[in-house]
Each structure stands twice: as C-alpha cells, then as structure tokens.
Amino acid sequence: MSKRRAWLLGVVTLILIALLLACSSTYNSSSDGLLVIGSQGSALLQSFSFSLASGRVAQITNTVQDTADLTCQLPGFPYWMILDPSGTHAYVIMRGTSQCPGPTDITVFDVNGDGTLSDKGTTYSLNTATVGVCLSGSSGQPTMEPDVAVLPVYMAMDSAGQYLFVADSATNDSNGNAVPGAISVFSVSNGTLTEVTGSPFTVPVSCNVPPNNLTTLAVSPTVFPPIVNGVLNAVCSNNTPPTAEYLYVADSTLTGMIWEFSVDTSTGALGPPPDFGSPPSFQAGQVPSGIAVDPCNRFVYVSNQGTSNSISAFSICNGGASQSSSCPPASVLPNGDGSLRAITGSPFSNIGSANFPGQIVVDAYGNFVYVLNGTNNISPFRISTVSGSITPLTPSPVAAGSGATAMALRSDDSWLFVSNFIAATVSQYSMSPSTGSLVGVPSIQTDNYPYGLAVK
C-alpha cells in the first residue's frame, strides 16, 4: 500500500470515529433531557437523551435494532410510569399477561447518571382491599367483601416526593360480581416503597349506580414551582405553600364524579376533608378520564370523555384570593377544605376535530392545560390566572401519532412527548414557555407498542 493510500485510509478512519462519537448516546444532565419509555412489544424499558437546545435525540439503551427479536424482557408488560421529583427513580406499574406471565405490581428502577436504568431488585405487590360489593341483581346495601385483589392503572406522586398514589380500577370478584375501585398509597424513601396503614382506601358505594371505577387521580401541591434563572416563575413562586394536601380521584363512570380526600402528610393516610363525615364528591362530565391540579393550588381540570367531549374546571377552596365566594370563609378555614367549585363557563368544549379527551396535564407554572385526545391529537389551552377559565391556543388541535396513549411534559416547560401505541413512535414537541404553543419535531422511533413514558 502506498503512503498516500495509507494516509487517506487513516483520515477516513478518523472521520468515521469522529462521526460515531458525534452520534453517540451520551447523556449530560446539564445540557440534555432524559426520556424513559415502557414498551409492551418486547416488555422492556427504553431510555433516550435529547438536547435541551435542539431536541436532537440519541438512544441510550435498548435500540430498536437490539429489541426486534426480543420478548418478555421484564416479567410482564409495563403500563403507567412516573419519575420522582428528583428524577432518580422510575416507578412502573407492571402487569403480567398470558404473553408475559408475571404478577401485577409496582417495580422501581434506578435512573443512573448516564441515563441508563437498573432494576432495584424489588417489586411491590399491592394490599388487597375490603370493599362494598353489590351482588348481581341487588339494589340494596352493598356486601362487604374482604381480600379483593386490586388492579392498578394510574399513579401520581406529591410535589414533595413523599407519597405515591395509585388508582385501582373496578374489577370483578371470583363470582363475577362487579367490584368498585380503590386508592393504594405508598410512602417513598429513596426509591423504597411502603404501603401505608389502611391502604387501599375506598369511596362510598351505592348499589343504585354503576360500580365506582377509579382510573385517574391528582394531588394538590405542598411545594410551589421555583423561580428559574430569575425569570421563569409561577404567580405563586414567592408565596408560602399550603401545609394541607388533598387528593382528587376521577370516577370514570357515566355518573362522572370527582372524589376528594384529605392526605395526612405525616402518615399518607386518606380521610375526609375538614367538616366532612366521608369523602365528598363533585360533579364533572360523563366518563371523566383525566384530572390535573394547578401547581399553585388554585384550580382542578377534568377531561370528560363522554358525550360532552369537554373539560370541567373547578376552583379549589384553599382559603386564598382565588377561591370561590361560595367557599367557607378564610376566617373560618384559613387553609380552606380543598372542596371544589365549578368555574364560570365550565365545562369548556374541546377543540375542533379533537374528541375523546383523556390524560390532561397542567404545565409546571400554571399557565397552560394540555389534553391528549383519542383522536390522536392534543388540545392546548391557556389558563386565566384570575378566574381559572381556559381558552384554546392556536393552532389547535396539534397532531400526534396513531394510538396516542400517554403524555409527559418536562418541568421547565421546554419539551412535551406523546407515546403512540400503534405507530411505535413518540411524538416530540418544542414548547414555548411564554405562549404555550407546541411545534412538532421528527418523531422518535421506539420498540413496538410504547405505552407509559416519563421525562426528566
């Protein structure tokens, strides 16, 4: 080989190495975000880094090529997923199936500094419930049935990272009787879960209505959003956050009720709010399927998947200036009782071709609401900081992919992601913190059937 050819070969090799390094999947927490996705195709988790500046995505673990022929890498399918406020642990509802046998539980994964994930080696089963069951054909009082297995479908964590709340949907007992849903609560300590005393908790049961189907929930904040770089902040960032904490649970039946619980911040136990003998309920629309609490503890938003195709909006009786005049006066309850009052104009209609609204999120600074629709698009709204009413943003709705299932918004209001179960992609959007507008960038190819996702 001539010296010239050897020199050219060396140059080409160096260029190829440089290109490989440029395309590497390194994760730098100071300049990159981290996206974690649960795949039901190969039953595994994938992680991606993305540039906070450009959104450019790089695979960290489990590339599509690596997983093409894999099945059941985890004992069951990953369903809903969240990260704790520090972003150091991922909490995943795992569900065993005939394709991937395994228990139904919650599995905790460590999120490592390089963006990879590792199983802590511990899974957490959920306590059985004692619930009121209406026997077939009965319209009388429910029969209390012990040791009923619960079916977790959704999770939320409080802003302090202290408790994990799990919505358990309606199921059937061994005799085929409909069993109402419940709420499981775990205390959290550095990724370790302990189910609190009394969990799971239930709502009042009536045999005159369909069984309570508790499918989604949201918890009020006890930590307010920080001021970022001295500029980006919420209207409450300089305020003292509340010490009282409330949990709101959507009953996804035609009755469309939202149940309220008071959270004991010392133990995590649920109970009725002040001056209520049992957990109260508040009327939303038919089949409420998503619920979110404003991070400043002012408003609650509920997506109604039934015929109304709407978003219900409530103000929270919090003892502050934003609460309704019909709330208990602050002189009586300085911190309010967490009860809800419908905002003038509620429910608000969904947008254009958007239909079957599901998951709903409020941005980290309480300015915008985003609703994920069964029509594979997103409805964005602006929140009135005074009244809590919502108005559509332009353009609306914003297209997602086929089988849009779950949505996650980064806490600095920079990027929003949607998992597309049928398309095997994740839609990615750049978000403007000042306007709330979403601009789509090329979607991310994933393993088959992506479901839950979380972003750091």
Image: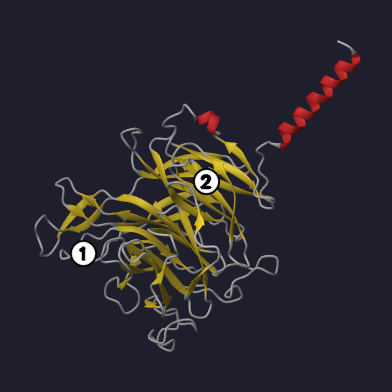
Q: Where is residue 444 drawn, in percent x and y?
A: 56, 43
Q: Residue at x 15, y 66 (%)?
A: 208
Instruction: Give SS at disc 1.
Output: loop
Residue occupying the far front of the picture? 352
Locate residue 414 relative to residue 102 in the image: left or right.
right
Q: Where is residue 365 drawn, in percent x and y?
A: 57, 68
Q: Nearer the viewer, residue 25 or 175?
A: 25
Q: Amino acid at mark 1?
A: Val
Locate residue 434 relative to residue 21 in the image: left or right.
left
In this figure, what is the number of numbered marks? Answer: 2
Q: Residue at x 73, y 34 (%)?
A: 21
Using the rendered view, name the quadrant where residue 186 is placed: bottom left
Q: Amino acid at mark 2?
A: Val
Q: Residue at x 26, y 66 (%)?
A: 255
Of the residues under marks 1 and 2, which one precedes in the sequence?
A: 1
Q: Nearer the viewer, residue 266 or 222?
A: 222
Query: On the image, numbered disc 2 is attached to which residue?
Result: 426
Q: Residue at x 48, y 81 (%)?
A: 322
Query: On the image, numbered disc 1 is attached to which residue?
Result: 205
Q: CA distance from mark 1 to mark 2?
A: 39 Å
Q: Where is residue 370 drawn, in percent x and y?
A: 49, 62
Q: Nearer the viewer, residue 256 or 159?
A: 256
